[in-house]
Amino acid sequence: MVIFIFAIKKIFNMANELLKGKRGIIFGALNDMSIAWKVAERAHEEGAEFVLTNAPIAMRMGEINNLAEKTNSQIIPADATSVEDLTNLFTKSQEILGGKIDFVLHSIGMSPNVRKKKHYTGLNYEWYKQTLDVSAMSLHKTLQVAKEMDAINEWGSVVALTYIAAQRIFPDYNDMADAKSLLESITRSFGYHYGSDKKVRVNTISQSPTITTAGSGVSGFDKFLSYSENMSPLGNAGSIDCANYCISMFSDLTKYVTMQNLFHDGGFSATGVTTAVMDKFGE
Ligand code: NAI
């Protein structure tokens, strides 16, 4: 029987209970294209129990209810810029899940300047502050609230999603590039303190461009997706594979990885040029 179940799992590429017994909080599942949605599905398959959260305004779309039903999880609305909401989130999550948290996915990004098509050299500064608050400072707030409440178990793992525009200029990424730089810096700085004090690890995963609601908001996204595909030896990494990487980062298989920015991009970040791109310039 055991061999039979193992064979079935192998055939259908099913779960290995990598997160069995672990409790999590997953931010940012808006619809079934969201990277966080895939992470929730995979975490459920791997035996985790978790709470889903998103900004109250995003709840209005209602799609998250389908995910909650499918993964047998509860939803706690929280604006990730509000310390009060985050405190409530960590308090209720521990009550619902019956103990401290083992993993957190920060999958949050939003820029009013991108949405309203402001050029990087003509930013609205109130919106710029919102970009930084929602997309980066929210990670600091999440970590600070969790640490002050001592809400995350030793060897717990926090992963935030980022993009290579933190290191290199991608003009249409606009002020989100600055937010991602800050996000990665917070990851290193907080990762140091949380690691030394409580053995909690903090990392970012730098993902290939992916078709989602946030991704498609960047102008010229389709052309860019194709450029990136041609510039990556393995091609663009998809959202399910990103979810798999997140699962490995939440698992005990990566216990000593912390304060890192981890590229999940098919090799894009280490590539100068590819023959596929060179060929487009002719002989
Ligand atoms: P998405 O649009 O599905 O997810 C973004 C989420 O942020 C949404 O669920 C939205 O409701 C949430 N959010 C916005 N403001 C919030 C607030 N104040 N409080 C709480 N949640 C809030 O798009 P996607 O692509 O799944 O984005 C997830 C993460 O992945 C983001 O950090 C994004 O920058 C990052 N990423 C995306 C890439 C892409 O090409 N799609 C590439 C690399 C990184």
Image: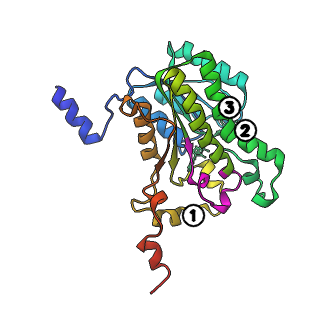
Residue in view at x 65 percent, y 43 percent: 182
Mark 1 / mark 3, whichever is N-terminal: 3
The CA distance from mark 1 to mark 3 is 29 Å
Label number found at residue 80: 3
The CA distance from mark 1 to mark 2 is 26 Å
Report the span colored magenta: 161-177
Residue in view at x 72 percent, y 38 percent: 133
Query: Farthest residue toward the bottom?
Result: 283
Q: Give the residue type at disc 3.
A: Ala
Mark 2 / mark 3, whichever is N-terminal: 3
Residue in view at x 41 percent, y 41 percent: 244
Q: Is mark 1 on a helix, strand or loop?
A: helix
In the rendered image, residue 231, in percent from the top left (x then y), is placed at 47, 65
Q: Does the magenta stretch include residue 176?
A: yes
User: What residue would you read off at disc 1?
Assistant: 224
Quadrant of image for the C terminus? bottom left
